[in-house]
Amino acid sequence: MEAAALLERFRSPGKGSGLRARRRLRPGELLYRAEPFAYVVSKELLGGVCERCLQRNEHLHRCSQCKVAKYCGKSCQKEAWLDHKQECKCLKSIKPNFPPDSVRLAGRIVFKLLRQSVCISERLYSFSDLQSNTEQLSEEMKDGLRHLAHTLQLYLKAEIQDASHLPAAIDFFQIFTKLTISYIESLMPTSERQKQLMRQYCFECDCHLCQDHEKTPESVIREDKCYMNSRYQLHEDAEKLAGEESAWKEVKDAVNEVRYPKSKEEWEQVLARCQSLLSGDTGRLPDTNIYKLKMLDCAMDACINLEAWEQALCYGNRTLGPYRLYYPGFHPLRAVQLMRVGKLQYSQDMFPQALETLKEAYNIMKVTHGTDHRLMQTLMDLKEQCEAIMKIQ
């Protein structure tokens, strides 16, 4: 079905344009699917995932020219060539330097606009439809964007020597005011989310959760007879920062210092730091504290990368309760976490527990991802293997 039959555009005062459904929707119903106008692999994941399909792979093939872009194989490299062709020269020309992620992304946008490529995602919105918030930015933020715009000009010099050769619609400064990423992470206190939303997107959120976060428990209970909704609203910020402030601030600082490790030694250092903090906060922080939860996730990732499956499962099990609290209903992050824990249970021959966990992940993921998603296929294969083993035991 065409997107126009399901969705319509509308103006939201103070927030720009939006999309809304034209009829009541079923949970998990696919509204629209298209590749993004432009995307890049973040610097911290560079070399670990294919630049085209974004799949993790330990045996990627490097572009012979820029030596930066890596692909699963010839098929992915061929499909990516149109987007990589011009940036390849730019990446090669600025070596040994490397552009910030936002500059590389902006470069891809410029090249795509110049060649006037048709993109399916623009059936709903074109790049020119995006709202610029230049006038609402502070002078400090404008200075930062001017610096990025200058960096972009230097980066593109191998392909675009003179900015005056660009069409009038393309302005280096405006490019950065129109770049968008996923909306801010929900796993942070409401006040911090509001500040980040205003800083990045220049509007305030007035959803019921943000409006209710400062209410007393009694007032929320009186106004909302739905127990689950009121419970979620009541405890959202209180649970997130539960425990001793000095303890969660230390964990918060440690979490913010972690960068994606690329070697076994780095993962060992991360795990040692996590274990030290987690053992030191006994009784001071509950697992529902968001910074402790992030630390548990970090420890789980480290154990998985170090193939310490039993330890990984221990940390993973502790995250499931908080994930259920913060990502209720059909939430993709909870589905993925359940799948990860289910795989770890499977690796430890805990087949009955693994099957129950995988079934729970399946029930969420068929709504959030759809049955044809590759992650869903992996989940179904694992679930079937688990069922087959249990039948012969």
Image: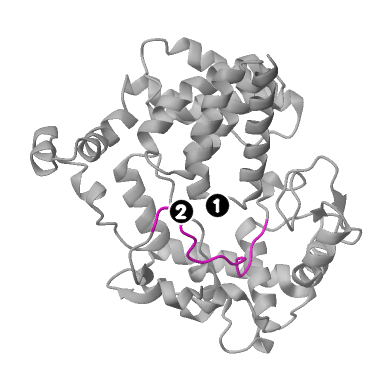
Q: Quadrant of residue 6?
A: bottom left
Q: Tell me residue 158's x, y (percent).
A: 79, 73
Residue carrying label 2: 28
Is 37 part of what is drawn in magenta?
yes
The boundaries of the magenta stretch are 26-40
**Tag 2's secondary structure?**
loop
Q: Position of residue 225 (x, y in %)?
A: 13, 40
The residue that label 1 is drawn on is 370
| Residue type, label 1 | Gly
Query: What secondary structure prevails in the magenta region?
Result: loop
Residue at 67% over, 40% down:
378
Residue 56 as seen in the image, left or right of residue 353: right
Q: Quadrant of residue 12?
A: bottom left
The 10 Å Cα crowd at callout 2, few under 14, some 14 to 19, many 20 or more, is some
Within 10 Å of disc 1 (Cα), the crowding (few <14, some 14-19, many 20+) is some
Q: Are the two marked residues, 2 and 1, in contact with CB atoms closer than 8 angstroms?
A: yes
* Residue 314 sits above or below residue 82 on the image: above
